[in-house]
């Protein structure tokens, strides 16, 4: 949330904190004057890092729907999608079609209203105002019943990657506390935001975890509970994995050529599942428009699913999915010490462009977080 205030859906907020409106901005409560505008990082066009612009003039969010709340943002974290959206893979900006459809489903506004755009989607903060339909929260609640043992900076590192991992492992992959014990889980791209969360989640449920990462992340992987760690840069990864016993579940955070060989590492005819987070869903929508993009996506995933079903394994795509109940379960796992935030680097609000450069450099070891409140 690269602004100091955010309008968000109250339903999605239960647990640790997820906001939907204006991310990288700060919300100010005191006087009517101070609440008419707020400091924010915005972009006026898609492009390189220098498109990020600091402004004190972004209009303070107002509640449009009864299920929304306004949050005073204390901390925010960045995700690869924020970078993709800033860079713009296509003329309209990565994910712009889906984003604009969500913001303006009836297409009432022109494309000119797309900018200035505040990037960011992860937040920890304090509820300032609630819509009339919100009963779960009240002003003053820390968003949103965040894990009690965490600071806002730590809490902001969790919602997006936590809900993405939860969606992939639990909702799509079907693993849970009761059926995960002893299952062999392979995580490709284990050292980033999603991977570091996913390792801890399936370990908390009793799985045996093989983590694939660069050599320098091995110690972190072991600390998070990985049983086996494979360095994908030391020789042929496929050959290194082939000599291990087969897996019950694979989470692919890398994509590309991995899906050509990774499914051969699964146990056959036993319900074993491969789930990838790297899909062409948003790109298809940007390239082909909403209807054709969705059709293309359906055809691609459908044909791959059927092809692999005949080989005795399940092939699935997963997406970040907002869910209050899942956030509550994540908060419990954090409060019980089974999951801890993994923070690569914290930046101050004035350093948002530096934080984007860090993200752009790759090689994440957990999350990049912005401390929105502390002055620096
Ligand atoms: N479908 C969705 O809704 C959804 C939601 C969230 C994320 N995603 C996608 O999921 C992926 C992971 O997200 P994230 O937030 O975890 O990204 P991240 O924080 O940037 O982490 C990526 C990690 O992968 C490692 N890596 C890169 N190439 C690798 C390889 N060939 N083998 C093993 N590890 C490799 C990187 O470290 P090194 O380069 O140093 O090895 C880094 O630690 C991204 O592509 C993201 O766009 C999708």
Image (spheres, rainbow, N blue to C red):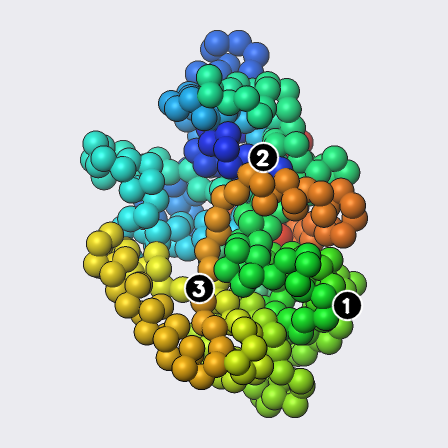
Q: CA distance from mark 2 to mark 3?
A: 25 Å
Contact between marks 1 and 3 (CB within 8 A): the answer is no
**Residue 222 marker:** 1
- Give me the residue at 57% from left, 25% from top: 136
- Give me the residue at 43% from left, 33% from top: 21
Name the side, left or right, on which 375 lies relative to 282. Answer: right
- Label 1 neighbour load within 10 Å: few <14, some 14-19, many 20+: some
Write down the residue under mark 3: 317
Between 179 and 15, the residue placed more toward the observer is 179
Q: Which one is earlier in the sequence, the residue at label 2 or at label 3?
A: 2
Pinpoint residue 225: horizontal percent, then vertical percent. 76, 64
Q: Quadrant of ligand 1?
A: bottom right
Name the side, left or right, on which 219 lies relative to 359. Answer: right
Pinpoint residue 40: horizontal percent, then vertical percent. 47, 32
- Give me the residue at 53% from left, 9% from top: 31
Q: CA distance from mark 1 to mark 2?
A: 31 Å
**Image position of 342 with respect to 147: above or below:** below
Which marked residue is nearer to the observer: mark 1 or mark 2?
A: 2
User: Under tag 1, what secondary structure?
Assistant: helix
User: Under tag 3, what secondary structure?
Assistant: strand
Instruction: Residue 127: name its quadrant.
Output: top right
Q: Which one is earlier in the sequence, the residue at label 1 or at label 2?
A: 2
**Residue 14 marker:** 2
Between 244 and 39, the residue placed more toward the observer is 244
* Label 2 within 8 A of ligand 1 by Cβ: no
- Label 2 neighbour load within 10 Å: few <14, some 14-19, many 20+: many
């Amino acid at each position: 949330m690269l602004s100091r205030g955010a309008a968000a859906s109250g339903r999605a907020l239960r647990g640790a904190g997820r906001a939907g409106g204006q991310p990288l901005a700060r919300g100010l409560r005191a006087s009517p004057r101070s609440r008419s505008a707020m400091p924010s990082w915005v972009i006026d066009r898609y492009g390189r890092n220098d498109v990020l612009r600091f402004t004190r003039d972004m209009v303070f969010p107002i509640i449009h729907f009864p299920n929304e709340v306004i949050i005073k943002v204390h901390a925010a974290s960045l995700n690869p999608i924020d970078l993709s959206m800033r860079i713009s893979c296509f003329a309209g900006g990565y994910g712009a079609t889906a984003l604009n459809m969500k913001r303006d489903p009836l297409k009432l506004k022109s494309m000119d209203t797309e900018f200035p755009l505040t990037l960011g989607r992860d937040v920890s903060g304090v509820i300032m105002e609630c819509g009339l339909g919100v009963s779960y929260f009240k002003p003053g609640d820390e968003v949103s019943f965040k894990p009690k043992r965490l600071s806002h900076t730590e809490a902001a590192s969790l919602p997006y990657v936590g809900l993405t991992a939860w969606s992939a492992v639990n909702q799509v992959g079907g693993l849970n506390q009761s059926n995960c014990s002893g299952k062999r889980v392979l995580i490709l791209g284990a050292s980033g935001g999603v991977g570091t969360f996913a390792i801890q989640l399936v370990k908390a449920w009793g799985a045996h975890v093989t983590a694939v990462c660069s050599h320098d992340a091995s110690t972190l992987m072991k600390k998070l509970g990985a049983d086996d760690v494979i360095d994908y840069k030391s020789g042929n990864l496929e050959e290194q994995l082939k000599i291990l016993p087969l897996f019950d579940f694979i989470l692919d955070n890398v994509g590309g050529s991995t899906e050509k060989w990774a499914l051969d590492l699964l146990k056959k005819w036993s319900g074993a599942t491969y789930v990838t987070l790297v899909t062409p869903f948003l790109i298809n929508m940007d390239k082909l428009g909403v209807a054709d993009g969705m059709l293309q996506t359906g055809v691609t995933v459908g044909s791959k699913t059927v092809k692999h079903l005949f080989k005795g394994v399940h092939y699935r795509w997963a997406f970040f999915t907002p869910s209050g109940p899942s956030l509550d379960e994540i908060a419990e796992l954090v409060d019980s010490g089974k999951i801890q935030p993994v923070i690569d680097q914290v930046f101050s609000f004035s350093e948002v462009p530096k934080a984007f450069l860090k993200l752009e450099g790759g090689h994440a070891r957990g999350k990049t977080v912005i401390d929105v409140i502390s002055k620096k």
